[in-house]
Image (cartoon, grey):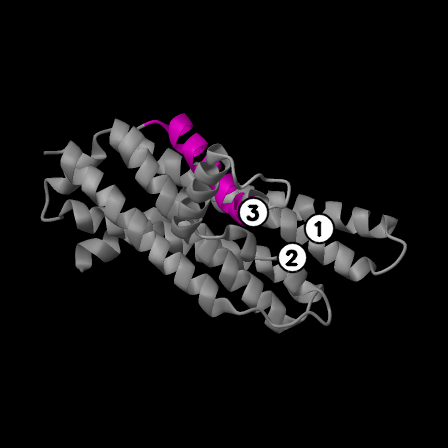
Amino acid sequence: MKAFVSIARLTLIEAWRTRVWLLALVALVVLLLLAEFAAGLAITDSANYRSGIYAALARLVCVLVTMLFVAQSLARELADRLLDLTLARAVSRAQWFLARLSGFAAGGVLLAALASAPLLWLAPAPAVFAWGVSLALELAVVAAVCQTCTVTLRQVTLAVSVTSAFYLLARAIDAMVLMSQAAVVDPTQWTSRVVGEAVRLIALVLPALDRFTAAAWLQSGAEAPELLPVALDSVVFIVLVIAIGLFDFYRSEA
């Protein structure tokens, strides 16, 4: 447990020393100014317009920052052979993998809190809390996928590309399922049936990220979101990704 906590703490220290938080802060300030400018152009309902634009763009910025930091941090550790030094001590590969992911997830919580803070002046506090919790869970999912991709592929570009493709697919999977069941699709064609079944199978595995961290939650009068399905989807998928990552991690080192 001591080694686990130390590795997770060093991950947070690395985020502080590499000024990732400063990059995120500058980006969020720019987004605030952009949202203020866009709200000034709105004829009515400028408050919801302001919070919606900021929330949607801040979500993407946080996801991008998380992907880049996870991939760069792990790729540097692998390239400099620091992982070999860590594993030479009384630390198992599973402990290292889970500790690093815990550190990245903790960084995601701090990043979500940083992104949520300006919304306290733009939206009701319960809605902001739900949005922030959902964003933290979403960043944990992204960190888990990016860590698995980086450890497996050993390249920053490939890891970020695959993680980005996963994120876009997870954001669009519900729409793809609806499109596969649309009236214009001919159910008598075998290709339509194969594509429809493939999309449904993918939807069973992927978390529906379009249901996460919705900007509509922040609108005045909006119903309180249900965080339990979001949390369950996140936990189940993270456990699955961890299992895949550890399987490949142990196999590659065998």
Real-space Cα separation, disc 1 to disc 3, in angstroms: 31 Å
Q: Is residue 104 left or right of residue 5?
A: right
Q: Nearer the viewer, residue 65 or 209?
A: 209
Q: Is residue 195 left or right of residue 84?
A: right
Residue 32 coordinates in the image, percent (x, y): 70, 50
Give the tally of numbered discs.
3
Q: Are marks 2 and 1 in contact (CB under 8 Å)?
A: yes
Real-space Cα separation, disc 2 to disc 1, in angstroms: 8 Å
Report which residue position mark 3 lands on: 181
Q: Nearer the viewer, residue 216 or 119?
A: 216
- Quadrant of the rendering where the N terminus is positioned: bottom left
Crowd around label 1: few <14 · some 14–19 · many ≥20 (10 Å): some
Residue 227 coordinates in the image, percent (x, y): 50, 68
Real-space Cα separation, disc 2 to disc 3, in angstroms: 27 Å
Dot 1: element: helix
- Residue at (30, 29) in percent of width and height: 153
Residue 14 coordinates in the image, percent (x, y): 37, 44
Q: Is residue 174 magenta?
A: yes
Label at residue 215: 2
Q: Label 3 is placed on what type of residue?
A: Gln
Report which residue position mark 1 lands on: 53
Q: Nearer the viewer, residue 17 or 51?
A: 51
Identify the magenta region: 155-178
